[in-house]
Image (tube, rainbow, N blue to C red):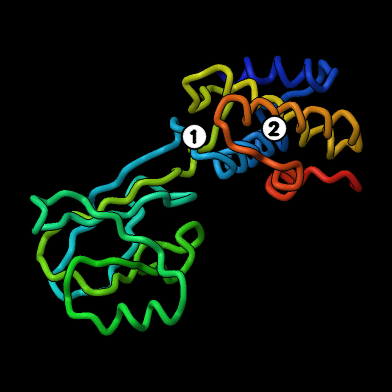
Amino acid sequence: MMTLEEIQSQVREHARATNITITSGDLLSIVNFTLRGMASLVPWSDLTATDNTMITTSGKRQYDWLKNDINFLDVTYIGIQDEDELNRFKRVVPVRTEADWEEFGELPDDLPRVYRLYGDPLTLSDGEVKIEFRPGPAHESKTIRRTGVREPDDLDANSETPFRLKFYDDIFALLISAIILAQRAQQPRAQQLASLAINRIRDNTGKEITVREIQDTLLIRADQ
């Protein structure tokens, strides 16, 4: 976990410019844009959250998607307590096809097996986004568990990053630097830093991130 000023020191070194200030103004906006983009690339353990506030109503299929204090960038798990299995959580998966959706819709109330989201949880308010389960839940007051990558809080001049490992902060600094340099038309160095970040993500998390994914997520373009 580093302060934003510590990240700034790394960015200045990567960008080879001592006059970069990321703790205020337009560059602070870039910092927070980069943090959200980085969060969407990999399910970082420091940004993983679980919510247990949603509860089933017997026979009710559709529920409000509650944000509470967690705004999920990506949902990696939804489970519902199974009364027949001592209330152990059983995974509910996103429906794959319309045919499957219709087929599960014909089943009597039971433990839900598939779900579908209506609306975008990232842009709409509570009550505007719905989640529907099929078949509908047969039992009352069972916990619906949601786990995923939460949207990180915006940083300011006095903030610390959400990452416990400084290795992740190093990746964060590399990506901020790459975006700033890309905007300043210093593409070769921007691409070099983005590639270095990709390698560090792969080495530490095991996930392969392509240059194209970085470009699409963080708007680092070779043709800018």
In the rendered image, residue 198, in percent from the top left (x then y), is placed at 69, 32
Q: Secondary structure at mark 2?
A: helix
Image-based side of 125 in relation to 220, left or right: left
* Distance between mark 2 and mark 1 Cα atoms: 14 Å
Disc number for residue 198: 2
State the image coordinates of residue 6 (x, y, percent, origin top left): 63, 15
* Residue 159 position within the rendered picture, expressed as x and y whole percent measured from the top left: 52, 24
| Image point (16%, 49%), residue name | 88
Q: How many marks?
A: 2
**CB-based contact (under 8 Å), mark 2 and mark 1:** no
Residue in the image at 50% along x and 25% along y: 163
Q: Nearer the viewer, residue 93 or 168?
A: 93
User: Which residue is tagged 1?
Assistant: 44
Q: Quadrant of residue 37?
A: top right
Q: Is residue 98 left or right of residue 187?
A: left
Q: Residue at x 59, y 37 (%)?
A: 207
Q: Which mark is residue 96?
A: none
Q: Residues within 10 Å of mark 1 (few under 14, many from 20)?
A: some
Answer left or right for 146 relative to 58.
right
Amino acid under disc 2: Ile
Q: Is residue 171 above or below residue 90?
A: above
